[in-house]
Image (cartoon, helix red, strand yellow):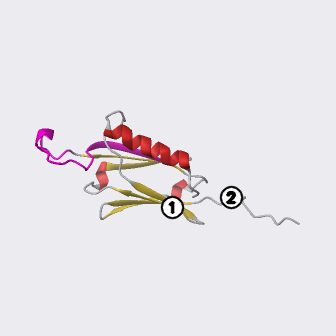
Amino acid sequence: MPWDPVRDLLTMQERLESLFGRATSAWSPPGDLTEYDDRYVLTLELPGLSRSAITVEYLEPLLTIRGKRSDQGCCPERYQQLERGQGEFCRTFRFERPIRAAELSADLADGVLTVVGPKAAGDRRQIDVG
Protein backbone atom coordinates (compact mmCIF):
# COMPACT_ATOMS: atom_id res chain seq x y z
CA MET A 1 0.00 0.00 0.00
CA PRO A 2 1.50 3.36 -0.94
CA TRP A 3 2.24 5.95 1.72
CA ASP A 4 -0.82 8.03 2.46
CA PRO A 5 -0.05 11.20 4.45
CA VAL A 6 -3.74 11.86 5.15
CA ARG A 7 -4.17 8.40 6.71
CA ASP A 8 -1.09 8.99 8.87
CA LEU A 9 -2.38 12.39 9.99
CA LEU A 10 -5.77 10.90 10.89
CA THR A 11 -4.03 8.21 12.95
CA MET A 12 -1.97 10.83 14.78
CA GLN A 13 -5.10 12.91 15.39
CA GLU A 14 -6.90 9.86 16.80
CA ARG A 15 -4.02 9.19 19.20
CA LEU A 16 -3.78 12.83 20.32
CA GLU A 17 -7.52 13.01 20.92
CA SER A 18 -7.38 9.86 23.02
CA LEU A 19 -4.60 11.42 25.14
CA PHE A 20 -6.66 14.55 25.80
CA GLY A 21 -9.98 12.78 26.33
CA ARG A 22 -11.78 13.93 23.19
CA ALA A 23 -11.88 10.64 21.33
CA THR A 24 -14.81 8.25 21.46
CA SER A 25 -12.42 5.39 22.23
CA ALA A 26 -10.48 5.12 25.45
CA TRP A 27 -7.42 3.85 23.60
CA SER A 28 -6.18 2.93 20.18
CA PRO A 29 -4.05 -0.21 19.82
CA PRO A 30 -1.25 0.07 17.24
CA GLY A 31 -1.55 -1.92 14.05
CA ASP A 32 0.07 -2.57 10.69
CA LEU A 33 -1.75 -3.11 7.40
CA THR A 34 0.35 -4.82 4.74
CA GLU A 35 -0.65 -5.36 1.13
CA TYR A 36 0.54 -8.37 -0.87
CA ASP A 37 -0.28 -9.30 -4.47
CA ASP A 38 -3.10 -11.62 -3.41
CA ARG A 39 -4.13 -10.45 0.07
CA TYR A 40 -4.08 -7.85 2.83
CA VAL A 41 -2.68 -8.73 6.26
CA LEU A 42 -3.60 -6.61 9.28
CA THR A 43 -1.88 -7.10 12.62
CA LEU A 44 -3.08 -5.34 15.76
CA GLU A 45 -1.38 -5.42 19.17
CA LEU A 46 -3.93 -6.55 21.76
CA PRO A 47 -2.01 -7.96 24.74
CA GLY A 48 -4.15 -9.26 27.54
CA LEU A 49 -7.39 -9.47 25.52
CA SER A 50 -9.30 -12.70 25.04
CA ARG A 51 -10.98 -13.75 21.80
CA SER A 52 -14.38 -13.07 23.33
CA ALA A 53 -13.40 -9.43 24.00
CA ILE A 54 -12.78 -8.72 20.29
CA THR A 55 -15.23 -8.19 17.41
CA VAL A 56 -14.19 -8.08 13.75
CA GLU A 57 -16.68 -6.76 11.17
CA TYR A 58 -16.26 -6.19 7.44
CA LEU A 59 -18.53 -3.98 5.37
CA GLU A 60 -16.86 -3.22 2.05
CA PRO A 61 -14.43 -1.49 1.93
CA LEU A 62 -14.08 -1.07 5.72
CA LEU A 63 -12.81 -3.52 8.31
CA THR A 64 -13.71 -2.52 11.87
CA ILE A 65 -12.20 -4.07 14.97
CA ARG A 66 -13.74 -3.37 18.37
CA GLY A 67 -12.87 -4.60 21.79
CA LYS A 68 -12.57 -3.85 25.45
CA ARG A 69 -9.78 -4.18 27.96
CA SER A 70 -11.04 -4.20 31.53
CA ASP A 71 -9.45 -1.78 33.95
CA GLN A 72 -6.86 -3.12 36.34
CA GLY A 73 -9.05 -2.59 39.40
CA CYS A 74 -6.83 0.08 40.91
CA CYS A 75 -7.93 3.63 41.43
CA PRO A 76 -6.12 6.13 39.13
CA GLU A 77 -4.70 8.05 42.09
CA ARG A 78 -2.46 5.06 42.87
CA TYR A 79 -0.85 4.65 39.45
CA GLN A 80 2.80 5.62 39.29
CA GLN A 81 2.70 5.39 35.51
CA LEU A 82 -0.15 4.39 33.22
CA GLU A 83 0.67 3.68 29.57
CA ARG A 84 -1.54 0.74 28.58
CA GLY A 85 -4.96 1.77 27.40
CA GLN A 86 -8.08 0.54 29.14
CA GLY A 87 -11.75 0.43 28.25
CA GLU A 88 -13.25 0.21 24.79
CA PHE A 89 -11.48 0.74 21.49
CA CYS A 90 -12.52 0.87 17.86
CA ARG A 91 -10.17 0.82 14.85
CA THR A 92 -11.31 1.00 11.23
CA PHE A 93 -9.19 0.19 8.19
CA ARG A 94 -10.00 0.84 4.52
CA PHE A 95 -8.89 -1.53 1.78
CA GLU A 96 -7.89 -0.09 -1.60
CA ARG A 97 -9.25 -3.12 -3.46
CA PRO A 98 -12.22 -5.36 -2.63
CA ILE A 99 -11.58 -8.53 -0.65
CA ARG A 100 -13.40 -11.85 -0.57
CA ALA A 101 -15.40 -11.40 2.62
CA ALA A 102 -16.33 -15.10 2.85
CA GLU A 103 -12.61 -15.98 3.08
CA LEU A 104 -11.69 -13.33 5.67
CA SER A 105 -9.91 -14.91 8.63
CA ALA A 106 -8.82 -13.69 12.06
CA ASP A 107 -6.55 -15.25 14.67
CA LEU A 108 -5.33 -14.08 18.07
CA ALA A 109 -1.96 -15.45 19.20
CA ASP A 110 0.52 -14.09 21.73
CA GLY A 111 -1.40 -10.82 22.07
CA VAL A 112 -1.40 -10.08 18.34
CA LEU A 113 -4.58 -10.18 16.26
CA THR A 114 -3.88 -11.14 12.64
CA VAL A 115 -6.62 -10.60 10.06
CA VAL A 116 -6.08 -11.89 6.51
CA GLY A 117 -8.27 -10.63 3.67
CA PRO A 118 -7.74 -12.33 0.29
CA LYS A 119 -8.16 -9.86 -2.58
CA ALA A 120 -11.08 -10.39 -4.92
CA ALA A 121 -10.17 -11.14 -8.51
CA GLY A 122 -10.68 -8.06 -10.59
CA ASP A 123 -10.36 -6.91 -14.14
CA ARG A 124 -7.08 -5.20 -13.37
CA ARG A 125 -4.36 -5.85 -15.92
CA GLN A 126 -1.33 -4.16 -17.33
CA ILE A 127 -1.64 -2.89 -20.88
CA ASP A 128 1.39 -2.52 -23.10
CA VAL A 129 1.65 0.80 -24.87
CA GLY A 130 2.43 0.26 -28.55
Number of other residues with Cα within 10 Å of mark 1, as a class: few under 14, some 14 to 19, many 20 or more: few
Residue, disc 1: 34
Precedes in sequence: disc 1 or disc 2: 1
- The residue lying at 32 percent from left, 36 percent from top is 20
**Residue range corresponding to the magenta coloring:** 71-92
Q: Classify the position of the N terminus by image quarter.
A: bottom right
- The residue lying at 76 percent from left, 64 percent from top is 126
- In the picture, the disc for residue 122 is 2
Q: Callout 1: helix, strand or loop?
A: strand
Number of other residues with Cα within 10 Å of mark 2, as a class: few under 14, some 14 to 19, many 20 or more: few
Residue mark closest to the camera, 1 vs 2:
1
- The residue lying at 59 percent from left, 57 percent from top is 2
Q: Does 99 sit left or right of 72 as displayed?
A: right
In the figure, residue 25 lies in which quadrant? top left
Which is more toward the observer, 34 or 61? 34
Q: How many marks?
A: 2
Residue pushed farthest top? 22
Which is more toward the observer, 53 or 69? 69
Q: Is residue 4 visible?
A: yes
Q: Classify the position of the C terminus by image quarter.
A: bottom right
Which is more toward the observer, 60 or 77? 77
Q: Is residue 25 visible?
A: no
Q: Measure the alpha-carbon separation of dots 1 and 2.
A: 19 Å
In the figure, residue 46 lies in which quadrant? bottom left
Q: Amino acid at mark 2?
A: Gly
Q: Is residue 36 one of those drawn in magenta?
A: no
Name the spot of residue 22 as percent of width and height, x first: 35, 33
Q: Callout 2: helix, strand or loop?
A: loop
- Above or below residue 123? Residue 67 is above
- The residue lying at 43 percent from left, 45 percent from top is 12
